[in-house]
Image (tube, rainbow, N blue to C red):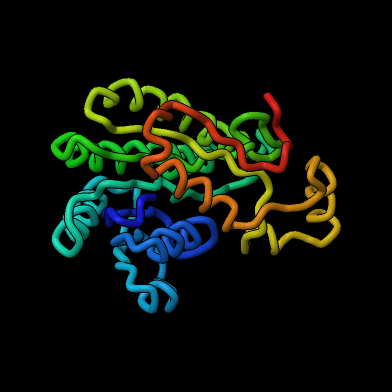
Amino acid sequence: MDKSTSRVVLVTGGNRGIGLACAQAFADAGHRVAVTCRSEAPAELAEAGILAVSCDVTDTEQVDSAFATVEEHLGPVEVLVANAGITRDGLVLRMSDTDFTDVIDANLTGAFRVSRRAVKGMMKGRWGRIILVSSIAGRIGQTGQANYSASKAGLVGLGRSLAKEFASRNVTVNMVAPGPIVTDMLAALPDDQQAAYAEAVPLGRLGRVHEISAAVIFLASEDASYITGAVLPVDGGLFMG
């Protein structure tokens, strides 16, 4: 983003992994940053001057309360990074209705809730950036992740609808689709499984969280002001559709 302009940025699910990397990158660039998290906020957030707000994106009242807190302390949200999400992996024949709907509610409907709340202020300010964190799983599917893949694919339809609705107010909406990225979740997998993921990537390695945050920073910048409704893959060439 333009370092001469300090924006108010909210990253949902910003207490670890990709969300934390995005929050830190925005803070390093001089922006006023807040994150939502359901668990205890890591010390790095306070050290970086990042506001941590407790929020479960499946609860509309908590979303409204979180935005009100950010607005009170930092101002209206100008950049939203909808990153919060969960997984409930399992093969379809063993997947319960709850496992499916809980993932859709957190990953897809949660992104809808925070986007709906954020865009109100963006319309008034006639400037805004919404970046939805999707996944390569939403583009190619993934065995054992029908719920997760469906939620991440749904973000593309949601984002493109938002992009069309709010383009006239100078609000852009884009999606980032990470491939296999080194996070706590992936690090918990056996070494041979991690190696198999890396081998499947044309670049021959797993991605790093800073490579995702760099893409997010770009889409939130003035340099990306003519980009909306786009899906930016950051996956080492794994999906070339």
The residue sitting at 47% across, 62% down in the picture is: 20
Q: From the viewer's side, name the closer residue of 124 and 190.
A: 124
Q: Is residue 110 visible?
A: no
Task: Name the side, left or right, on which 213 lies relative to 109.
Answer: right
16 over 224 or under it: above or below: below
Residue 160 locus on image (x, y percent)? 41, 24
The residue sitting at 83% across, 54% down in the picture is: 195
Task: Name the side, left or right, on which 180 lies relative to 54.
Answer: right
Q: Is residue 31 visible?
A: yes
Task: Name the side, left or right, on which 195 lies relative to 232.
Answer: right
Residue 36 locus on image (x, y percent)? 35, 59
Residue 213 locus on image (x, y percent)? 51, 53
Residue 198 locus on image (x, y percent)? 80, 50
Q: Quadrant of residue 172?
A: top left
Query: Which quadrant, please, contains the C terminus?
Result: top right
Q: From the viewer's side, name the closer residue of 120 and 191.
A: 120
4 over 111 or under it: above or below: below
Q: Residue furthest front?
A: 4
The residue sitting at 52% across, 38% down in the picture is: 100
The residue sitting at 27% across, 57% down in the picture is: 6
> How many numbered discs, if any?
0
Q: Quadrant of residue 183?
A: bottom right
